[in-house]
Image: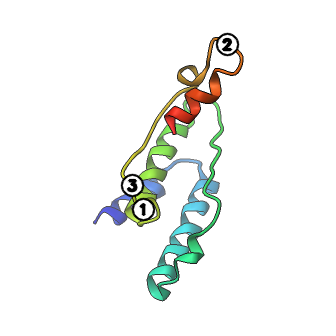
């Protein structure tokens, strides 16, 4: 099953204890929604800032997070947009905002 495969990948993340905790908490909320049918439990801020040095797994985490949210029915659209800083950086003042809005 897709959920099991994703859960296994989460467990394989090395050194990301906070991320694993976050996944565990969210998984518990999803299971509660499945039992009660009350989706308001999932109405929370889903903004996530992923920081870290190069090579620490930020992109891997982001991709896995999307797959998790989609598999558990939190994110209904199957659209994942991946951009790096250079793709969002403008060469003039005020040019970054439209680039970010276009990406989202």
The number of discs equals 3
Crowding around mark 2 (Cα neighbors within 10 Å: few <14, some 14 to 19, many 20+) is few
**Residue 17 visible in the shown view:** yes
The residue identified by callout 2 is 92
Tell me which corner region of the image, top left, top right, bottom left or bottom right, holds residue 20. Answer: bottom right
Tell me which corner region of the image, top left, top right, bottom left or bottom right, holds residue 42. Answer: bottom right
Tag nearer the camera, 3 or 2: 2
CA distance separating discs 2 and 1:
43 Å
CA distance separating discs 3 and 2:
33 Å
> Where residue 38 sits in the image (x, y, percent)?
52, 83
Which residue occupies the foreground of this view, 52 or 62? 62
Marker disc for residue 41: none
At mark 2, the secondary structure is loop
Q: Is residue 49 above or below residue 99?
A: below
Q: Residue at x 42, y 66 (%)?
A: 72
> Where residue 93 sits in the image (x, y, percent)?
71, 16
CA distance separating discs 1 and 3:
20 Å
In the rendered image, the residue lying farthest to the top is 91
The residue identified by callout 3 is 77
Q: Residue at x 40, y 53 (%)?
A: 67
The residue identified by callout 1 is 7
């Amino acid at each position: 099953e897709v959920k099991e495969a994703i859960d296994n990948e989460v467990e394989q993340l090395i050194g990301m204890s906070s991320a694993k905790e976050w996944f565990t908490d969210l998984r518990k909320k999803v299971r509660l929604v499945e039992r009660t049918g009350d989706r308001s439990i999932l109405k929370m801020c889903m903004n996530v800032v992923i920081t870290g040095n190069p090579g620490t797994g930020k992109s891997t985490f982001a991709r896995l997070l999307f797959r998790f949210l989609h598999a558990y029915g939190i994110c209904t659209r199957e659209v994942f947009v991946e951009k790096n800083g250079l793709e969002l950086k403008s060469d003039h003042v005020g040019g970054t905002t439209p680039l970010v809005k276009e990406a989202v």
